[in-house]
Amino acid sequence: MFTILLVRGVDLVFDFSFDKWTYFLGIIVGSLVLAKLVLFLLNEYVHRLTKRTSTTLDDKLLAAVDKPIYLAMLVAGGYAAYYFSFGQNALVFLGAKLGVFVVAAYFLIEVSEALLAWYREELAPKRGGSGAAEISVLLSRIAKGVIVILFGIMSLDAVGVEVTPLIASLGIAGLAVALAFQDTLSNFFAGVYITADRPVRVGDFIKLETGEEGYVHKIGWRNTHIRTLPNNMVIVPNSKLAQSVLTNYYYPDKEMAVVIQVSVAYGSDLDKVERVTIEVAKQIQKAVPGALESFEPFIRYHTFGDSGIGFSVILRVKEFVDQYIIKHEFVKALHKRYAKEKIEIPFPQRVVYLKK
């Protein structure tokens, strides 16, 4: 509009006789200048504000809408140039309408790409997601396909093509594909859930209700790979993993308590047993690699058993696999110390009376 007033103002002041093509070219040039000016303002001033934020999301969104805004202004300028120069034209109006659809589709594709790139590069690494790159690429392709199909149908409808049969055909085809790839789609959406909700992360040590346990090696869009302690790889479909009751030994922290069951004879001095056992436990906590040095071990008596008094010794390790070495060293050290202190470790006994 500004360009039109400028051209007409110049015509009045200098008494120039501009024909229709001069108006057309003038508005086109003005639209280009205005588009460049808007982009300059966005990059120069808005970009300064986005740089001050801690996230890169706004930077990616700003970069994504750069070209779509430029194209939108060119489409609007082209239509305005023709309308104000030559008047209304049904074919030109249709072309402008299709241009709007193309720009809108391009805008949505760029914004979805920016959001997925932000999630893949910034959010997923902070949350420990490994399958984010693979899943985001697949989601990007799906989003592009949906947007292209949607705006393709809208474009066909705009030019007068009957789209109802096409929509019905696409619906039937989509239903057939969904039924044919039911398991694959189930695993895919389960993978999206696992990546987003993070019940497990790459590197976590987990145990499934079916008994499999190990380190999460990879979370793909279809399967999750679990490396067991014997160095075998267990492949679990994501849908099964999402439905499984599992224990994550690394969530919320890697540190974990180690409970060791011990029993002493009924004739033992329990105060002495407690003192000796804690002394051994403290030595193990400070000497064994993987044990948490700052933790103060303790014991709790809990059972009058058939052969002796049972109690639990509570130690603490830095992560799951460290429990094996701390149990190993503690049992050896405690057995040696009990022998020295004359503390009896009972064993099952059965008294049999023979009837004469």
Image: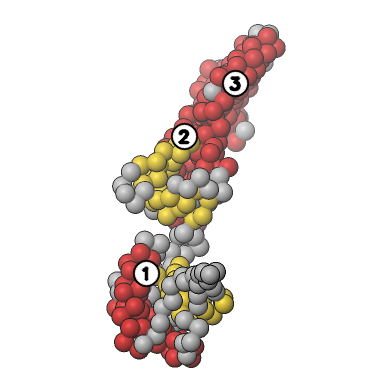
Q: Secondary structure at mark 1?
A: helix
Any mark on residue 327, and which?
Answer: 1
User: Is the C-beta separation of discs 3 and 1 under 8 Å?
Assistant: no
Query: Which residue is painted at 40% across and 41% down in the image?
Result: 234
Query: Which of the 4 image quadrants contains residue 297?
Result: bottom left
**Quarter of the rendering containing residue 239:** top right
Depicted 280 relative to depicted 32: above or below: below
Q: Earlier in the sequence, mark 3 or mark 1?
A: 3
- Tell me the number on the disc at residue 71: none
Judging by the rendered image, the residue that carries numbered circle 2 is: 222
Q: Which callout, 2 or 1, points to the residue nearer the camera?
A: 1
Specify few, some or many for label 3: CA neighbours under 10 Å numbering under 14, 14-19, or 20 or more.
few
**Front position in the image: 216 or 5:** 216
Which mark is first along the chain, 1 or 2?
2
Q: CA distance from mark 3 to mark 2?
A: 17 Å
Secondary structure under badge 3? helix
| Between discs 3 and 2, the one toward the N terminus | 3
| CA–CA distance in space, label 2 to label 1 | 38 Å
Quarter of the picture holding the N terminus: top right
From this view, report whether residue 353 is shown above or below residue 173: below
Give the image location of residue 262, x and y in percent.
Answer: 45, 75
Q: Which mark is residue 179?
A: 3
Please report contact status of discs 2 and 1: CB closer than 8 Å, yes or no: no
**What whole-number distance in Å separates the C-alpha atoms at marks 3 and 1?**
51 Å
Question: Quick one: 203 or 22, which is closer to the camera?
Answer: 203
Residue 221 in percent (x, y) is at 46, 36
Residue 164 place in picture, x, y as percent? 70, 12
What is the residue that sits farthest to the front in this orientation?
356
Residue in the foreground of this view, choosing between 185 and 153: 185
